[in-house]
Amino acid sequence: MRRLWLIFAQTVTVSLAVLFVVTTLKPEWLGKHAPAGAGVVALQESSPATAAAATANSYRDAARKALPSVVHIFTSQKVKARRNPLFDDPVFRHFFGDSPEGEGPKTSGLGSGVIVSPNGYVLTNFHVVEAADQIEIALSDGRNLDARVVGSDPESDLAVLQITESKGKELLLPAITLGRMDNVAVGDVTLAIGNPFGVGQTVTMGIVSALGRSHLGINTFENFIQTDAAINPGNSGGALIDGQGNLIGINTAIYSRSGGSLGIGFAIPISIARDVMEQIIQTGSVTRGWIGVEAQEITIDLAESFGLPDTSGALIAGVLRGSPADAGGIKPGDILLAVAGRPVKNPQDMLDLIASQKPGDTVAFRLRRQNSALDTNVKIGKRAPQRRER
C-alpha cells in the first residue's frame, strides 16, 4: 500500500512540473495564447462589451460627423510701406530721384469656418476676413484651397466665403448638417470646433448656458447662444454643434479678462446665420428695415415718471426729420409697444423687429402717448449698411 502511495505522489509531482513548464514555455500546446503585448505586470483591460457601453456615453459620432466640415482660415493683408518725408523735399528728390510706393510686409491672421454647402460656401465671422487681401482655406483632409469673399454683414459679424475650384476639378466638400433652433434648450450638450491659437483642429465640450443673450455691445444685432464650451482666439467662425453633430451656431466671441476662455462664450444662432447667408448669396448683401428713430430703455424710474404699469416697450428719444417714422406720425416721447402685432420688450427688440421688416412694406405700429394707446402705419425704409466700430 505504501509503495502505491509513493508511486501516486511521484506521478502527481512530475505531472505538475511538466504542466508548469508547458504553460510557461509552450502555452499554445494547451490551446492557449499569450496576450498580445503582455507587460511585466498584471493589467486590467476593458472587454469589448465595456468599450461598446462607453461609446454610448461618448460624443465621438457627433464629432466625427462635423469635424470634416470645419476648416481653418488663413488670411493675409498687404501693408503699404510708409513714405519717408525726405522724398517730399525737392532738393533730395533732385539728387536721389522719386521713391516708388512700395509694399511692406504682410500681416496675417487665422480663424475658423464651416462648410455649409457642397458648392463650397463657408460661413465665418466678418472680423476673421475683414480687410483680408488673400484667403486660404485648410481642410481637415490636408487640402489647402483659395477662397473669395462672397459678401459680409458687419452688423451681425458674419461673412460668406466660397472656395474657388482649381482647374475645373470637383472639390467633393463635406457640408455640415444644419440644426434647428427650435430643438435647442438650456442644458443641451454642445461641442465647439475650431482652431484655437493655431494649434490645430480642436473639440471642446460644454452645455447651452443661456439663449437670447443681448446688450453685450459686441454686434449691432445680438441674439447669442451662450455656452461654457471652451472658445479661444482662433475659434472665431468655427462650429457650435449639438450632441448629434448638427450645426446650431457660429462661434463668435468670449467674455474674458485674460484673453483665454473663462467659460463664457457666445455663438450666433444658426437661424440668424442662415438668413444672413441666404441673403448674401442671393443679393451680395443683407437688407434690413429702418424707420429713423432713436430709442432708449425704460427704467423703473422712467416708468414711474411716465405712469407706466411696467418697463416693457422702447422710449422714442428722437425722430429723424423726413424719416419713415416722422412721416408715420411717431414723435419723441412716444413709447413703442408693438411692431406688426409683435410686442416690443426693449430697444433691442425694437431694432430686431424693425430690421426684419421688408423695405417698402407698410407696417402697423402700436404706441403709447400720454397714457393713451395709439395705432399708426409706417412705410418701412431701407437701413443703410453700417461699418462695425473697432
Image: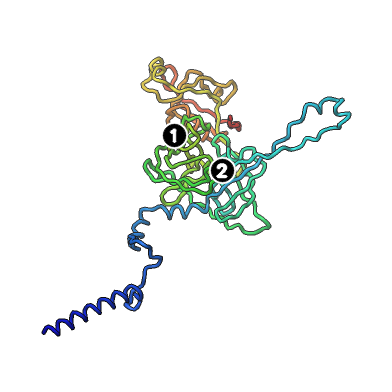
Task: Determine whether label 2 and label 1 are within 8 Å by CB.
Answer: no
- Dividing the picture into quadrants, the one containing residue 371 is top left
* Residue 125 percent location from the top left of the image: 55, 40
Instruction: Choose between 345 and 254: the one closer to the eye.
Output: 254
The amino acid marked with disc number 2 is Gly
Crowding around mark 1 (Cα neighbors within 10 Å: few <14, some 14 to 19, many 20+) is: some
The amino acid marked with disc number 1 is Arg
Where is 26 relative to 315, above or below? below
Q: Which mark is residue 111?
A: 2
Quarter of the image where the N terminus is located: bottom left
Q: Is residue 59 left or right of residue 239?
A: left
Where is 162 relative to 51, above or below? above
Q: From mark 2 to mark 1, how far is it between C-alphas?
A: 23 Å
Q: Which mark is residue 213?
A: 1
- Is any atom of residue 286 visible in this view? no
Where is 2 relative to 253, above or below? below
* Residue 49 percent location from the top left of the image: 33, 62
At horizontal 33% and vertical 72% (from top left) the residue drawn is 24
Q: Which mark is residue 234?
A: none
